[in-house]
Image: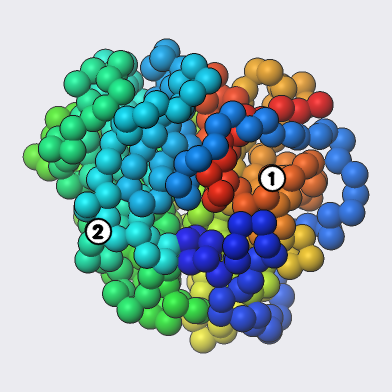
Amino acid sequence: MYTDIARRGRAGSPAVRRFGRLAVAMLLAAPLLVVPSGSASAATSITWQRRAAGFEQPTHVTSSRDGTGRIFVVEKAGRVRIYRGGKVLATPFLDIRSRIKDDGEGGLLSIAFHPRYRTHPFFWVAYTTTAGDVRVARFRAASYRSNTAAVSSARTVITVPHPHEFSNHMGGQLAFGTDGLLFMSTGDGGGGGDPFDNAQRKNTLQGKILRLKVLGAKAACGKFACVPKDNPFAGRKPGLGPIWAVGLRNAWRFSVDPVTGDLWIGDVGQGAQEEVDHLTPDQGGRNLGWSCREGTAVFNSSRCRPGARYHAPVWTYGRSFGQSITGGFIYRGSRYKSQLGGRYIGGDFGSGKIFYGSGRSLVTAGSLPNVTSFGEGATRELWAVTIDGGLYSMSAS
C-alpha cells in the first residue's frame, strides 16, 4: 500500500497511479462483479466522528479486547500509540523506530494481540527492517494493563525477504483466526506488474497469505513460529509451508470474521480494478490470480498457467469508483446490527468512498478521505485512521 499511498498523492488530493494505467486484455470466464459508478443512493448512511488527531501517518488501528477500552494506533515510522478515555497517552505503547526502514511503503505495518491478551500479554508486530525486508516480531508487556512494552522483549517470528530495489507492496497485515493461528499478508515484492512473478510462484513467500502457529512461549515446535500441519503445502512440495493462499498483489488490509472464521481481503489493483476476496477456513491453497489477472480481467496472459483455477473475487470496482482499496470488516457490532449486521464495510483511499456489500454490488454509504485502515474496538464497533493522522469511530443511520 504505502507507495501506493505515496503514488496516490497528498492527503486530500486525487489518487495518482505511480505505474500508469494498463489496458485490460479480456474478461475471464469467472463471474464479473464490477461495482456500478456509485451514483445510487445508499440505504444506510455511514458517518465518522473524529476522536483524536495528530498521529503520524497511521497504518493500522485495533483493540486488545482486554476490558481496558484502549484503542491502539500504529504509526508508520515505528510507534504504537494508545487512545484511552478520550485522549492519546503521551508515552507510546511501543517505540521501535530505530529498527525500522520507513521509506516508500515500508514502516511499522500492523499489530495483533494474543486472543487471550488479559492472561497472555503477548503481541505481534509486522514491520520493514533497516535492510528493507518484512519481519514479524513478538513482544510481551508486563501485564495486560501495562501502557508500555519493553523493546528488549522482542523475539523474531519470521522474516520475508523483499527485493531491495523496490520499496512498495509490503503487505504486512496480521490477524488471528478463530482457531488461534496467525494470518499474515505479504506483497508481491513491488515494482509494476509483479516483475519477478512472485505472487504465482510457490517457492517464495511474497504475494501470499501466510498462516503460522505462534501461540505459547514456544509454538510446540521449539520455535516462535511453526507451520500448521494442515497448511496446504506443509510437508510436501512444491510450495513453502507457511503459504496459505497465493496470487495477491498487495493485500492492504484483510480481516477475519469472528463468527465464521472467514477471511475478507482487500487487494490493491494495478491500473484497472480493485477487489475484495473472500476465503473460508477450508479454502487454503486457493489462487487469487495476480498477476495472471487483476480482479476479473486478464492482466498478463503469459502468467496464466494451463489448467490453473483462479478464485474469483466477491466484488471489484474500477477507476470511476475508486483508485486504491482499504480492506474492511464484516460488521459484528451491536449498535448498528439492524442496518449493517453481517455486511462487509470497506473504503477507498483515493476516492474517499465508504461502502458496504449488498448482494452483487458495493453500495456507497459515506466518505472518509485517505482512510488507511479500519479496525474493531472492544465491542466490535468499527474505527478508522487516515493518513493525515485522524482517529475516527463509526456511526450509521
Circle 1 crowding by C-alpha within 10 Å: few under 14, some 14–19, many from 20 = many
The residue located at (48%, 37%) in the rendering is: 61
The residue located at (52%, 25%) in the rendering is: 377
The residue located at (22%, 66%) in the rendering is: 131
SS at badge 2: loop
Q: Is residue 346 above or below residue 275?
A: above
365 lies left or right of 247: right
**Residue picked out by circle 2:** 129
Residue at far right of view: 40
Residues at circles 1 and 2 in contact by the CB criterion of under 8 Å: no
Q: Is residue 335 above or below residue 298?
A: above
133 lies left or right of 277: left
Tell me the quarter of the image containing the C terminus.
Answer: top right
Q: Is residue 179 visible?
A: no
Q: Where does the image place residue 224, in percent across and percent down from the top left?
A: 16, 41
Q: Where does the image place residue 14, in percent across and percent down from the top left?
A: 69, 65
Q: Amino acid at mark 2?
A: Thr
